[in-house]
Image (cartoon, helix red, strand yellow):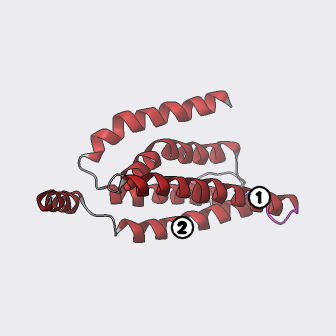
């Protein structure tokens, strides 16, 4: 378990301090917002439908398949998502930035994770769902995430639009 999370941390570090800075100069932030759920949709589809990956087994989930999806998710959470979250708050004023971060952090992340954990634990403990059904659920959730991210990503200004708005605001002062 320790080696697994060490791998997550090393990959996150390489992504956050090596790959992302190099690619962010020519990649629009909205594409990164849209790319995260796309990657997770692919990973969850491979869990839900293991024959898509070309495996010759019986279609059962394996620990390696689940661990790979979890590794990708955690690596993106600790690197890409953290960077993009901060970019959302930069243009806001001081009060909105910190109040918004606090409200979203408590309600969105912590409460959402807790509610989802409780619901999934309840369904699993009553035998309503097993690993296969959970993989279908995660694929559906990743699909909803992709749809939402796509719609919201279209609202994110491009670099050129943001620079133009900044120059306009600077000239009005």
SS state under label 2: helix
Q: What secondary structure is the stretch in magenta mostly built from?
A: loop
In this rendering, is residue 119 above or below 2? below
Q: Is residue 99 magenta?
A: no
Answer whether residue 127 is magenta in the image: yes
Which residue is painted at 28% across and 52% down in the image? 27
Relative height, residue 56 to residue 122 (above, below): above
Choose between 158 and 104: the one closer to the eye.
104
Closer mark to the observer between disc 1 and disc 2 = 1
Q: Position of residue 168 (x, y in %)?
A: 14, 62
- Label 2 packing within 10 angstroms: few (<14), some (14-19), many (20+): some
| 124 left or right of 5 in image | right
Query: Residue at (53%, 57%) from the top-left corner?
Result: 104
Residue, far right: 126
Q: Which residue is mark 1?
A: 118
Q: Quadrant of residue 124?
A: bottom right
Q: Quadrant of the C terminus?
A: bottom left
Q: Secondary structure at mark 1?
A: helix
Dot 1: few (<14), some (14–19), or many (≥20) neighbours within 10 Å?
A: few
**Where does the magenta region start and end?**
126-131
Is label 1 in contact with label 2 (beta carbons under 8 Å)?
A: no
Q: Position of residue 100 (x, y in %)?
A: 48, 57
> Residue 110, how many percent across, how many down?
63, 53
The first of marks 1 and 2 along the sequence is 1
- Residue underneath mark 2: 143
| Dot label at residue 107 | none
Answer with left or right where residue 35 lies relative to residue 53: left
């Amino acid at each position: 378990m320790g080696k697994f999370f060490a791998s997550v941390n090393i990959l996150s570090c390489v992504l956050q301090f090596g790959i992302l800075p190099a690619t962010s100069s020519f990649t629009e932030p909205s594409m990164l917002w849209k790319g995260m759920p796309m990657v997770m949709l692919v990973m969850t589809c491979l869990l839900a439908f293991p024959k898509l990956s070309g495996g010759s087994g019986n279609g059962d989930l394996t620990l390696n398949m689940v661990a790979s999806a979890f590794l990708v998710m955690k690596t993106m959470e600790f690197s890409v998502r953290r960077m993009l979250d901060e970019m959302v708050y930069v243009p806001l004023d001081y009060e909105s930035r910190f109040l918004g971060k606090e409200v979203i952090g408590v309600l969105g992340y912590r409460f959402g994770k807790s509610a989802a954990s409780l619901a999934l634990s309840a369904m699993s403990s009553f035998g309503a769902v097993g690993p296969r059904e959970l993989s279908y659920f995660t694929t559906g959730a990743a699909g909803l995430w992709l749809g939402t991210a796509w719609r919201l990503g279209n609202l994110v200004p491009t670099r050129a639009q943001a620079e133009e708005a900044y120059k306009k605001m600077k000239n009005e002062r």
